[in-house]
Image: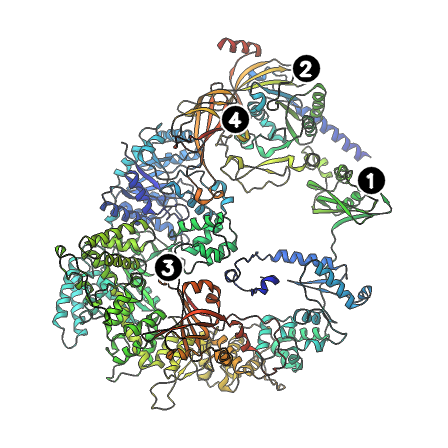
Amino acid sequence: MAVSSDAACLGLHPGQKATDAMALVPELTTADAEPEADAQALAGLVDWCVRFSPAVAADAPDGLFLDISGVSHLWGGEAELMADFRDRLASNGLAFHLALADTPGAAWALAHFGRDGTIAPPGGQAELLKPLPPAALRLDPEAAAQIARLGLRRLGQLIDLPRAPLGRRFGQATLERLDQALGRATEALRFRRPPTPWTARLAFLEPISAPEDMARVTTDVTARLCARLEAENQGARRFEIAFHRADGKALPIAVGLALPGRDARRIARLLHPKVETVDPGFGIECVTICAYAVEPVSGRQIHIEAGLAPAVEDGLAPLIDRLANRLGPERVWRAAPVDSHVPERAVSRAAALGAAAAEARPWDPETPRPVRLFRQPEPLEAVTALLPDDPPRQFRWRGRTHVVRRAEGPERIGEEWWRREIGEVSVAHVRDYYRVEDAEGGRFWVFRAGPYGDPAAPPKWWLHGLFG
Amino acid sequence: MTRYAELQATSNFSFLRGASHPEELVMGAAALGIEAVGICDRNSLAGVVRAWREMRELKETGATVRALTGCRLDFADGTPSLLVYPTDREAYGRLTRLLTAGQMRSEKGECELHWEDFQAEAQGQLLLVVPPERLEASFEAQLRRIAGELPDVWLAAARRYGARDLKRLSHLAALAERSGAPMVATNDALYHGPERRPLQDVLTCIRETCTIAEAGLRLEANAERHLKPPAEMVRLFAKFPGVVARSAEIADRISFDLGQLKYEYPDEPVPSGKTAIQHLRDLSWAGADWRYPDGVPERVRATVAHELDLIEELKFPNYFLTVHDIVRHARDDLKILCQGRGSAANSCVCFCLGITAVDPTKEDQDLLFSRFISRNRGEPPDIDVDFEHERREEVMQYIYARYGRHRAAIVATVIHYRPRMAIRQVGKALGLTEDITAALAGTVWGSYGEGVPDEHIRQAGLNPDAPEIRRAAALAQELLGFPRHLSQHVGGYVLTQRRLDETVPIGNAAMKDRTFIEWDKDDIDAIGLMKVDILALGMLSALRKSFALLDPLDDGTVVTDVAHIPQGDKAVYEMLCQADSVGVFQVESRAQMSMLPRLKPRKFYDLVIEVAIVRPGPIQGNMVHPYLKRRNGIEPIDYPAPHPDHGDADELKGILGKTHGVPLFQEQAMRVAIVAAKFTDDEADRLRRSMATFRNVGTIGEHGLKFVRGMTVRGYDPEFAERCFKQIEGFGSYGFPESHAISFAILVYVSAWVKHHRPDAFLAGLLNSQPMGFYQPAQLVRDAREHGVDVRPPDVSFSDWDCTLEDKDDPRERLRPVRLGLRQIKGFKAADAEALMAARAAGADSIEAFARQGRLTRRALELLAEADAFRSLGFPRREALWAVKGLAGEWGAERDAPLLLRQSLKEAQVELPFMSAPQHVAEDYRTTSLSLKDHPVRFFREDLAARKIVPCLVLKTARDRRRLSVGGLVLVRQRPGTAQGVVFMTLEDETGIANIVVWRDVFEANRRLVMTTGFLVVHGQVQSVEGVVHVVAERFTDLSHRLSELREETDHPGREIKVRSKVSGALVRSRDFH
Amino acid sequence: MSDFRAIRAKIAAMESAERAHAGVLAFGCAAMDARLPGCGLPLGRWHEITGAGLEAEVSAAPAAFAALMAAPLAQRGEAVWVLRRDDLWAPGLAGLGFRPEKLIQVCARDEAEALAVMEDALATVGVSAVFGEVEAVDLTAGRRLQLACEKRGSTGFVIKRRPYGGTARKAAAGSVAATRWRVASAPSEPPAGEFGLGAPRFRVDLERCRGGRSGTWILQADQAYSWEAGDVAHPLRLVADLGDHELAAEKFAAAA
């Protein structure tokens, strides 16, 4: 749980009940805690910190260690490095406390319990640590609470105690934390490995700008990445290529695959039409490509050996990639069932390839539905029907009168009342659907909106679809 | 006109499926001209009594609708679902046996049935086979098999306005034709009227744990599953002649009616060779001799004889014998304190049998015993028995042992949707976020209520006009009062002579080895089964424990029972008149305390009134002030009378005489309805019951009209009539009858007697029975100390697990010191206390010795040290903790394992920082919830004084209307449902307590402070009336953050360390009563 | 080297096998199959289906018929349906027994794109049937479609559909379609004792058929709107044989 700084000013604090908080600040907005997202954000921040030092370690849930031994001179000193770090964090809108010390333990203690921005002089952390509470040692909370209960509220008091009795009572771990903070013991941090995304890069001595050059480097850089994917039996669903222009701008374009792939030629072919749209400006200095949604794929050669069964990645997947990249992905789909009684909501467009979502039940074939459904139902005229809910006997549609020979219905579909103001919900908000057949055999799906009742406003009739 | 019976109606006792109460279905059917309606809940008969009762009541109004008792059986083995209707009592017994068998082999709330189970019990049942949604070939085979094996089988066919209804129906018709199970029309109703569709959809979502947007095809497509009139059914089934009328023909064949389950009481307690009434007579007269050792007064003799005749006439002797047997066993064999109450308990027979301690012939206890059982109602008598709460389980086990599990079971309690749960679940179903539903639910105080008012929604920071909020609020409102599940009643037992499972289905409870029936107390009442309430009462535990610490009375009596306490002690009443009643049964609440000085109880019956008057009934009926005025002679006592043409001018005097003409008890209100408004007994009873149920808002109005009209036409003042009815309304939901008040008043007197004479024993008894009552240990201790009790802290050298009385330092002292038990230490376990006591008995006298000989765990020792319980060994708190921690092996070793002691090491002396008094007090509160060392507020006194905040003590002498400020810890917050939004708070400082009244508008403006703050200053005006002093709050100052200062180190004042110190909420957690 | 040759031989074998596979799809009734070359609907070719009157615009009966006729093919592989208007409704296809989960729908922006997509899809491994709703197929386009069909043995169904409100374009002369069908809904007949509509019926004119004879029939989709739909060898059943197309037309005129 956390509160923003504004909220803190209003007197809210973590641990408070949401309702109490709301009673205090009615216009409060709250969001559910997302520990996973937090962890992810922290990992992102750790990756970003690599620009200062390659040795970065995450300190969950909300901290990180940066080992700057041997790098601070690049900034002109520790203070300068910290200032730069501070500026960059601040410009990203992050809230933070910084401290710099000889040991991770001391830095942690100062960052959490000391003044923000403290830089402990080499070997001088002990004095700075003394006024801090025992909790600054990153102790097990229960041990910290009991130490406090003994009246030991400051590390100074703890440092002054004889070691053996202290260790006996609060464990070797407590002594170790103390030593780590004071620099008497070393601490191994678990540095995050630099990220190894699937990426490849080509830089040019002279900026390029000719379309054919751009197409060529696209092919080359794609081939380079795909070779790596191939070597590790991986494939990716998405490729992003970025052209870094001399003026510092990067122009990304992306293609998606229906199935994970690593066929460089195919991918390059999908990229080429888009590369043509890239404006090289004063020239491209460098091109990078990244692969996303990487997952293992088996080698394709097997299929030719295996016999006749065509594999999707041989036929369908490239077809869909071609179509989707040419017409736009929204123009290629598979119809998937949606759990809804309302006809126009019963279908969604699913990805043309890929695992079908097994969530919704398949359409019930026993409930007849037309093969053509009009996006806008078309009004019927001159409908004659018996009250209260008999099918129409005849109707006129697009200027032609149809005499109904056979009919089924009504199938009554109520409104989705939860989309309406509760006060306006009514059992009269129904559609009565009929499947009717005219004398020639034409089969129509018509409905009456609402029941008969008000003679002044007789219900309207509509044609919603055709069965053929 | 075609006849029609709806044979497939699902009530809301098919939890999360049906969206109407059984009563609504019956009423709806009556209104539509449907001849009969069969409630068929899924593998359950939980709703049938309600439907049946509604039918009986509608009959009074001339309706002829029948409520058929049926059940929908869903099978675990793929057999199609069946609607079963038993034709006679025997077939009904077979059905309940079947359901019992199915439920007993399943988890709570489930029922696993197989076709073979049904086959065995099929005789006499009419069967309607429910076709599945998808008609596959296998269904025809199953239908043929069922129809082939059993004689009375039909095929139920419904029209749901699906795409191909008629095609499906013609299929079913053909199936019916081929299999010999004729087709019959039903409407498979889920609710009585179509407007329930949204609610039914919400129920579906709750059941499927999805939101309404995700629910899709799990919802019904339309609102057609409601009851439909015969003509409409005929139209819908026009193509299938005869199928509608067939339903009524089936209904005609059912002769079973729940009224046939006439009650049969167990005949166990009767010795052979005697009839039950003979035995009861013998026991009663023997009891009379025991009660009146100096000779049974003639008045008593006559009363007992009269009552016994009535009991014989109504065939209730077994009932009294059964209750007597349970009470006798508990008191004589188990030595458990117990006491009966309830209408039948007011009888002289019960007094003689020792079931109650109320002598109904006492002058001021002129009980209405002739009505102790209703001659007309045909309902069984009602006795509740309270037992010590810690030992009730033993009594329950006795009942099972005595009557067998096949004949004794706990009745059900129907758990209804209450506002919080309703809004939470509806909100979730409608897709509101967790936070919004929590906020909405959080605006509801307590569990009763009238839904969610707009202003509360606004206060939760939400917009009541937002459609999704309105939707949630409206549907939650509709869901209120729906049954959610069945739970076992706290102590209501049903006992039968024949197998209970042939009367009502029995199922497993969540608790292991517990079973309970499907019906609740009202159902049992309606059917006339015998029930006994075995209830738990904390005060009885406390009293027994206190009694054990008392010295023999002056006359040598060793007090072991309530009856041993001398009656009529003036000093005891005097104490109560002073509102000195902390810890006293029933009259310790704020409201009671402020009533005591006004009512000034001087005799026993005053206590009865005291108990009953601070209740929603009299308060809502606005009866309290008139009563007090009359009692105190401010207002003349008169009795409203009817017009002389309409009867006896004194007709109300007989009823209301002992309450000065003001109706205070439920019995009086009912009598007024009968005598003054000319209700029949049945009408009066129906009135009482319709109040108690959640629904029927409409019928309450009807009753009200009838009541007021009944009185006014007879010449009563309409205003008086209105007031009477208001009171009845209040009784409805919180009914408190005189018969209960009398039994409670006995405990009021007895507990007050012990408090007055022996506050030491009283304190120990109360503390040893915690949790119970209104106050927390800290307040009980404080009160005892104010009464001169020397209370001593828990200490390893002196304390047992329980609180004990120590020897007097000076034999002339009246009271003995109370040594707090180790039970006061939070987290400390009884078993560790036992071990510690054993070690002490074996001579342990050091921390190490306790640890070694008691084999105490590290955790136990730390708890003792932190609670400062080693002080007698010379180890104050910090030093003790340091020492305890030094005993052990490595930190991180299993905390809960006994310490493996090493040779004691020579250690460097360590000087731990000095612990200040405030720190000690704060730690005392943390570890034992109280401190004998000091009161936390004292440390702020200087500060408070500087702010002109006066000590609570000042209130005792403060004049009325003075403005002042008091501050203290918040002990209790209360917002009674009857007080129209007023909140009562109790503050405590080192000098006493202050009673605060927060009027509604002040509360609304300071909602958070009032609801959450632990240390509060109240600025307001003194209101002092008849010795009752309140502060009416105007403003507040929150001092909660100051409490953390108590814990601060004071030895280094120069270096204040306040880094990230978390604001501690409160030292004491207030008890909040909503 | 020898490995290479072996693989190449295998591929060649596969390709020829596919072509041989193309074969025909029998309707399962002799009266119809006898009029078709090879006793069934030729596969690895493309077919033209048209509707009359309003159906030329809404094209419901032609679409339903095409789906029914191709349903067995859709069991064997993927199907692609190229649309210009997005009004094809999968629940309707499901009711007829055509599994929509095997169908990829593509909405083309113009006629030329629709034809290009058809061509691309027909030439794709694993695609067994391709439907295209277009206004007309000229000779060149027809040939290209044919070539695409032959590549993998896939079968094409061109549903001729006029844009709403558009005037009829003159049918391109000399279509290379293997067959040309004209389809209209026909009145249904429920079995005795049942209410409502019977199984869907179509009046089907085989107007042109390379290497076969024209004919006119009433066909019924027996299993439509049941859970069994799609489980049979061919969903269409012959109800009435009206003989030669011309003959039937005369009969019809005489009857009217």
Q: Amino acid at mark 3?
A: Arg
Q: Amino acid at mark 4?
A: Phe
What residue does disc 2 label?
C173
In the rendered structure, are the residues bearing label 2 and label 1 in contact, judged by CB atoms less than 8 Å apart? no
- Tag 3 and tag 1 share a subunit: no
- Tell me the subunit letter for badge 3: B
Crowding at label 1, few (<14), some or many (≥20) Cα neighbours within 10 Å?
A: some
Q: Write down the residue under mark 1.
A: A216
- Tag 4 and tag 1 share a subunit: yes
- Position of residue A277 relative to residue C231, above or below, is below
Q: Element type at marker 3?
A: loop
Mark 4 → mark 1, Cα distance in angstroms: 52 Å
Residue under the image location 24 percent in, 48 percent down: B259
Are the residues at dot 4 and dot 2 in contact (C-beta closer than 8 Å)? no
Give the numbered dot on residue A467: 4
Name the residue beneath numbered marker 3.
B514
Q: Secondary structure at mark 2?
A: loop
> Real-space Cα distance between discs 3 and 2?
87 Å
- What amino acid is at disc 2? Ala
Taking the image as shown, residue A148 lies to the left or right of residue B466, namely right
Looking at the image, is mark 3 or mark 2 nearer the viewer? 2
